[in-house]
Amino acid sequence: MAIRVVPGAADLACDLAGRFLLQVTGSSDADAALGALAKARDEIAAMASASAPRAPKPVLSQAVLGPQGPLLLVARLEVGNDLLETVPELVATSLREAGVRTAVVEVLEPAGPLDRLDVTANAVLLRLFPSPAGADGEIPPHWIDVAADWVLGDLASTATVPLRLLGAPFDVVAADAPATLHQARVAHTWCDVVSGDLTDRLRTASVTFGRLPHLTLAAGGPACDTKALVARFDLLCEVARQLDDGVAYACVDFEPTFEGIGAGLPTDGWQENGGAPANVVAGEVGDVRVPDAFPYQIIGPGHVARLDGRATKPANPSTKPVRNDGFGRRVGSVGAAPIGEPLPLGRLEVQIGEPTDWLPIFDARHEVLELGWKLLADLLATDADVAALRRGRKGRRTREAEGEREGTAQMGGPNLDEVTLEAVPHRRRGLRLTLLELVAWQAHEAHSDDPRTVSPVLASFARWFAASLDPDLHQELKPRARRLIGTRSRSLTGGVGRRLPLDDDTRVWMAADWLARVQAPAWLRLAGHAKAAAGLEKIRPTRDHRHLDRAASQLSAAIEAVARGAEGDVPPGADALAWAVWERVAETAGWVAASEAASVGVPELLAYATELPVIECAREADARADLRPAKTTIERVARAAAARAAGEDAWSVGWRAASATIDERSLVPQVTAFERATRAASTRLGLEVDAAEVAIEAGEAAARAALADAIQDADPPASPWDAARDAAAESSGGATWAAVQDMTRDAVGADPWEAGMTTARTTVGRVLQVAPALVDRAVVVALAREAAGLAARSAAGRAAAAALAGGASSDEATDAAREALAPTAASLRDEAFVLFDALIEARSNR
C-alpha cells in the first residue's frame, strides 16, 4: 500500500467550512510522518496567506502524535474550495518527500461523544497554572503523570478510556492514555481524558494551551450530591497541596458543568465587577496577582511578597473569623497576620468560607465571593494593573491568538531529559519507565516491558543489566533505547528445532564468549589464579565459536584449581558472608545479564541439567574425587549431562509432533490408544501393569540415550528417530515396548501411524541439527558462570575471614568482602556497557 488519500477527504474539507482535522494513519514511519505533517502545516499557512493576504490568519494547531497517528487541527482557513480540495493531497506529497513509504491521509470532523462533557452537570475543578508566559507557557512534564494518576489511578491498565485530542475522539487503553497527554503537552495542543460515565460520576484531566496554558483536573457528574462534591473538593485540594513544583498559582472551584474544563476561568466574578479578565491575569501575571476569589487557592512567593509589602491593616470585622480547616491550618484570616497557611517553597494555601458555601445551587456563593474579594484585595487586579505589569515584562511574548505559535516538528515519544529510568515495570506510561518501556514508547508500541521490536537476546540483557545499576548509571542507558528499536528479526523462532535468527545467534555466542574470556578471567585473577586467567584471555575468537571448546576445557581446569585451593581456606561464617556479597555483585558486574542473554534459546531443562553437575563438582569435594578414577573432567561430565537432556527433549518433542499428526487423522487419540495398548500388552505378556510400565520406561530410556549419542556423534545415523526406536526395541524392556507400539499403531490405524512417524522423523531431525550448538553453548555458559562465581566468592571469603580473624564484626567483615570485589565489579560493569553496545550493533557473520 502506497501513500493514499481517503476517498471523499477533499470534499469533506470543503463541507466542514475550513474547520477540520487532518490525520495520518498506518504510517511506515510515525516520526517521519509527524515531521511531514508539521511541514504541511507551514505550507497550509503559506497558502492561506498568499490566497487572502488581508484575511485573518488561520488557526493551525501543532502537529501532534495521536493514538492512531499524527494529527493536525485546521480552523478559520478562509480560502476557496479549489484550494481546500488540495489540502489532503498536499499532506500526501509532504509524506512522500519525507520518505514515508505507506500511509493514509484522512479528514475528520473535530467532534465526538466527549462533546457532551461540556453539558455534564456538577463539576469540581482544580486548575494548575505554570509560570505565566502567555502563549509560550509550558506545563511542567511531571504534572502529566499527576494528571494520569488522578484520572486513571483506580483503573486496570487494560481498561479502555475515551479521550479527545484537538477535538478528535479516541478510545485507548489506560496504560497508553498518558502518552497522548504527554504528546499534547510537548506539541502545545489540547487534550481531555475521561474516566467514568458522563451520566453518572467521572474524573477528567485536561491539558490546555493557547492564551492560557494550564492543567485542569476535575471530578463530579450528575450522580454526585453535595457530600460527594465536597469529598472531591477535598481530594483536589490535597492534589494541589502535594504538587509543589512548578505551580505559580492554583485554584479549586465548583462549577455547574464541565464546560470550563479547557476554556479557562469563569468570567462572572471579579471580571464583572471591574476586574481584569481572569484568563489574562492567570496567563500573564498569575505569579503575582490572583484572577478571582475561589474556595481554595494556592499562591506563590510573588503573591506573598506583595502581601508582605502592604501596610498593616486592622482586621475587617465583616471577614469570617479564623477557623481550623481540619488539617491543622488557619484559614480566612486578614489584617496584620498573613492570609492562609504556609506550604513548602514559600507558598500559601488560602481557603475561604466553607466548601458548601460555594456550590452553585446555593445562594451563599455571591456572599462568600465578596468576602474573598476583601480578603484578596491586595492581589486582585484591574486592567490598568495588568497593563503596568506587562510593561515591566517586555521580554515576554504575550500573543493573544492561539494559532500564532510557529510550527515545529516534534519527534514522537518522550523527551529523554524528562524521563527517569527505573528497574520495576509500571502499570501505565509516564516519565518513570523501565528501559524497555521507554523503547516501546519510542517505537510507538503499546505500553509494555517486552516490546515487539527488540531482539529477545537484547531484551534479556537490558532487563537484567538495567535492574543492577544504581539510579545515576541507570540513566546512561536512555540514549541506547532508540538503538534497540528494530533489532528483532522478522524470522523469529517459531517452531520446534528452529534456529535463532542469525543476528541473535551471533549475540548469544558473543555473550557466552564474554562470560568465558572477560568475566571469568577477571575474577580468577582476583582470586590469585593469574595463569588460568591469562590462558583464557589469550584465546582468540573464531567465527564458528570453536575457540570456546578450548575455553571450556580451561574453565573446567580453573574450577577444579579454585575449588581445591578454597578447601578449608574459608570458614563457614566467612563463606556465608561471601555468598551474600556475591549475589549483589553478580548483578552489578554484568554476570547475570550476560548469563541470561547467552542462554536465550536454550531449553530450561537443558540449562539446568548442564549446570547441576558443574555446581556439584565445584562445590563438593566428593563429587570432584569421583572424577579422578573415571579419568574425566567437569567439562566432560557437563557435556554428557547436556547431551542426555537434549536427547530426552528430542524424544519428547518427536512424540508430541507424532501425536498431533496422528490425532488429526485418527478417530482414536494417540494417548488413549497408548494407554489401552499398555493394559492389553501386560495381559498378553502375563505382566502386571506396573511391570509393563517399568519395561516401557526402559525402552524409552534406551531411545533417549540413543538420541543423546546421536547429538555427540560426529557421524549420526541417517534417521535418528528410527535409530532411537530400534534402540528401545532392543533394550531390556524391548519386547513389551514393541508390543505396545504395535498395538497402538493398530488402534489408531496404519496410515495415521505412518504419517505420525514421518512427522516425528522430520521434527527430530530438525531438533538434532540445532542440539549440538545448544549443548556447546549450555556447557560453556555453565562453566564460565561457575568459574567466575567460585573465584569471586573465594576472594570475598578470604577478605571476610581475615576481617573476622582480626576481631571485626559481621557487618565489618561484609564490608571487607564487598571492598575486595568492588574494583573488579566496577571494571566489569564498564565492560558490560561495552558488551551491551556491541550486542546492539551485532550482525551475523553468516
Image (cartoon, rainbow, N blue to C red):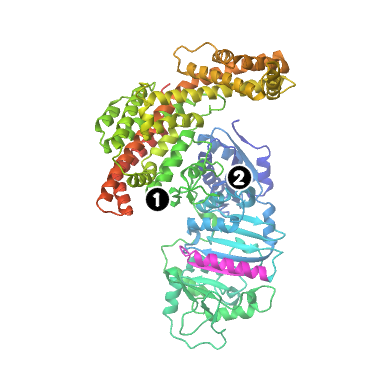
Residue 237 appears in which quarter of the rendering?
bottom right
Pointer 2 with pointer 1, Cβ within 8 A: no
In the image, is residue 208 above or below residue 574? below
Q: Relative to residue 158, is residue 711 depicted above or below?
A: above
Q: Nearer the viewer, mark 2 or mark 1?
A: 1
Numbered tag placed on residue 22 in the rendering:
2
In the displayed structure image, the side of residue 611 where residue 27 appears, left or right: right
Left or right: 57 in relation to 507: right
Residue 522 seen in the figure: no
**What is the distance, in whole Å, between disc 2 and disc 1 at their CAs?**
42 Å
The verdict on residue 243 being magenta is yes
Residue 471 image label: 1
Quadrant location of the C terminus?
Answer: top left
In this rendered view, identify the residue nearer to me: 793 or 294. 793
Question: Which percent across, then down, holds residue 307?
Answer: 45, 78
Residue 424 in the image: x percent, y percent? Answer: 48, 48
Secondary element type, mark 1: helix
Please check the rendered image and state whether residue 510 is part of the magenta-colored stretch, yes or no: no
Type of the residue with mark 2: Leu
Tell which circle, 2 or 1, labels the residue nearer the N-terminal end: 2
Highlighted range, magenta: 227-253
